[in-house]
Amino acid sequence: MIYELSQKFFFEAAHTLHRHMDAAGSRRIHGHTYHAEVTLVGEPDGSSGMVQDLGSVRGHIDAIRELLDHQFLDDVPGLGPATLENLCKFIFTKLVARCPRLVAVSVERPASGDRCVLRSS
Ligand SMILES: Nc1nc2c(c(=O)[nH]1)N=C([C@H](O)[C@H](O)COP(=O)(O)OP(=O)(O)OP(=O)(O)O)CN2
Ligand SMILES: [Zn+2]
């Protein structure tokens, strides 16, 4: 059997975005509340009963959250244009190094209903 383990977190951040539509508003500095979810899959280890200890997942998420929460996303090294897509990739790339069973990252802006999901396969 395969188990799916997930954890949610949120961060608040500002950014600008260069785009063809609604260009002026997006180019101005503005902010969003982002809700993210990470998902691991696997079978629990026989002795621990865990796919991965959620405490360790939370610790690794906290380190990534520090890079994003209350930051100006345009200045975050390695992120690129601060889109939902790039936020998913940024979180995935950093977290998979610590959580090898990571298979998906989603980032959502609940206020607008926008959401992106990045899956490894
Ligand atoms: N594929 C994507 N498209 C857009 C993204 C994105 O991350 N991926 N992001 C944005 C913007 O960040 C933007 O602020 C949202 O713009 P818009 O949908 O026009 O919403 P409003 O400006 O009307 O209102 P908000 O308060 O900013 O939600 C755009 N596209
Ligand atoms: Zn925006």
Image: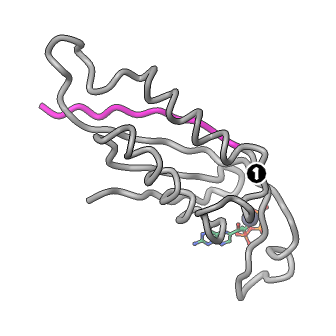
Q: Quadrant of ligand 2?
A: bottom right
**Number of residue marks:** 1
Q: Quadrant of the N terminus?
A: top left
- Position of 109 with respect to 38 (left or right) is right
Quarter location, residue 14: bottom right
- The residue lying at 22 percent from left, 15 percent from top is 49
Residue 105 to residue 17: above or below: above
Q: Residue at x 68, y 48 (%)?
A: 68
Residue extending furthest toward the top: 47
Drawn side of residue 69 relative to residue 115, left or right: right
Q: Pinpoint residue 32: horizontal percent, then vertical percent.
A: 75, 53
**Quadrant the C terminus occupies:** bottom left
Is 105 part of what is drawn in magenta?
no
Name the image quarter holding residue 2.
Answer: top left
Q: Is residue 103 above or below residue 53?
A: below
Q: Residue at x 29, y 34 (%)?
A: 4
At horizontal 38% and vertical 46% (from top left) the residue drawn is 96
Q: Position of residue 22 (x, y in %)?
A: 78, 81
Mark 1: few, some, or many residues within 10 Å (few <14, many ≥20)?
some
Residue 37, image x and y in percent? 49, 42
Q: Secondary structure at mark 1?
A: strand
Amino acid carrying label 1: it is Ala
Q: Position of residue 63 (x, y in %)?
A: 58, 36
**Label 1 CB sits under 8 Å from any ligand 2 atom:** no
Relative to residue 22, is residue 106 depicted above or below? above
The residue closer to the viewer here, 36 or 22, is 36
Q: Main secondary structure of the magenta part?
A: strand
Residue named by callout 1:
13
Residue span colored magenta: 1-11
